[in-house]
Amino acid sequence: MPRPPINLHNMVRALLQHTSPLPEEADCPIRHFDRSANIGLSLIKYIDDHIDPNDIYQAGYDRHLGHLRRMALAELIESFERFLKELASLCVDFLAPYTLDDRFDEFVPRRSEQIAAFVTAGSIGRALCESDTWIKNESINRRFRALLKMPFGADWEFLFPNPVQPPEVERARAETLAILWQIRHNLAHNVGVITHSDSMKFRVLIKEGVAAERRLAPSIEDLRYVKRFLFETASHTNERVGTRLGEVLGKFHADDPGLFDAQLKAKEISQRFEWSISIHGHAGQL
């Protein structure tokens, strides 16, 4: 008896109904990043712990684990991008009720699908921040500089400055992050194959040659170093952004103390950032 025909169009559409709940950490960007960034390395460790080296062909094992490490590397970098979106979304939600200036102009929906998301997101921060990619230092700087400026004031400092932008102390971190953004692009669009175009872009970023017509083959040590760098960068960025958000809200409160209870607001923000943030002299408790 022949097998019944399968409607592949419907099967692909059905994939979108196969979901799982977000973890409880999802309401705190730094905790959500911590969980997401650990998943890939935990998976590799789980496989290593449950495979008997006497029962495998080493060449096949190396080939499959190489593919898994590329996937884990991509997910590490994507988790950091998600962290930046969630951080900005929090800032928007905390600032939106009190601001009348142009700080949100960088986030205003420009396409119809973004407008639809704006209506259904349930949070102005998610609506404004989630629909675009956050994978270039330049655009990330532009958004956070506008978002965290003082009321009707000049833009804030550069979060990830280029070699001629302040603050100088952040430049090395920004340069390394730019390399990871390019690696993410390579993994997403060329499945790790280093094209001649990729090779030239990497050469400019790391100031040395990178062979073309090769495939990225990250080691487990590579993943651990990337994870460590991104964890340190996420923690540092979380503190910088949270502290600055407290300063901006402190200015709003100083101008009009009746806007909100500074102590309660500091506590609320500190819990969402998992970092003690002060507003107009009121320190938040975790």
Image (spheres, rainbow, N blue to C red):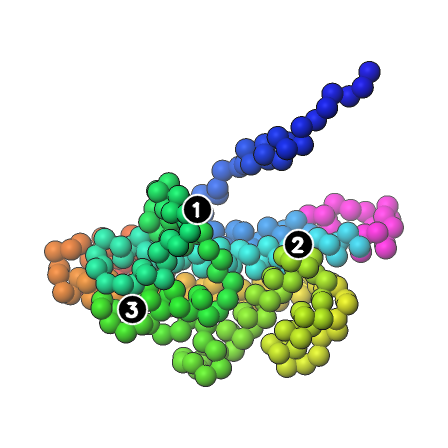
**Extreme residue toward the top, this view:** 1
Counting from the top left corner in percent of width and height, residue 73 is at 63, 59
Alpha carbons under labels 3 and 1: distance apart: 28 Å
Residue at the spot 70% in from the left edge and 26% down from the top edge: 6
Verify whether residue 61 appears in magenta: yes
Secondary structure found at label 1 = helix
Q: Quadrant of the C terminus?
A: bottom left
Residue at the spot 71% in from the left edge and 71% down from the top edge: 196
Verify whether residue 138 appears in magenta: no
Q: Quadrant of residue 107?
A: bottom left
Of tags 3 and 1, which is closer to the observer? 1
Q: Which residue is mark 3?
A: 149
Q: In screen coordinates, is 231 left or right of 243?
A: right
Q: Quadrant of the N terminus?
A: top right
Q: What amino acid is found at the position of numbered circle 3 in the picture?
A: Lys
In terms of sequence position, does the residue under pointer 3 or pointer 2 come before the other?
2
Q: What amino acid is found at the position of numbered circle 2 in the picture?
A: Met
Q: Which residue is mark 1?
A: 113
Counting from the top left corner in percent of width and height, residue 279 is at 23, 63
Counting from the top left corner in percent of width and height, residue 240 is at 38, 68
Q: What amino acid is found at the position of numbered circle 1 in the picture?
A: Glu
Q: Which residue is mark 2?
A: 71
User: Which of the labelled discs sits on residue 17, or is there none?
Assistant: none
- Structural crowding at the residue carrying mark 2, measured as other residues with C-alpha within 10 Å and reported as few (<14), some (14–19) or many (≥20): some
Foreground residue among 48 and 140:
140
Res. 62 in view: yes
Q: In screen coordinates, is 208 left or right of 245?
A: right
Q: Which residues are magenta?
A: 45-62
Are circles 2 and 1 on residues that touch, CB within 8 Å?
no
Alpha carbons under labels 2 and 1: distance apart: 29 Å
Q: Is residue 94 above or below residue 147?
A: above
Q: Quadrant of residue 235?
A: bottom left
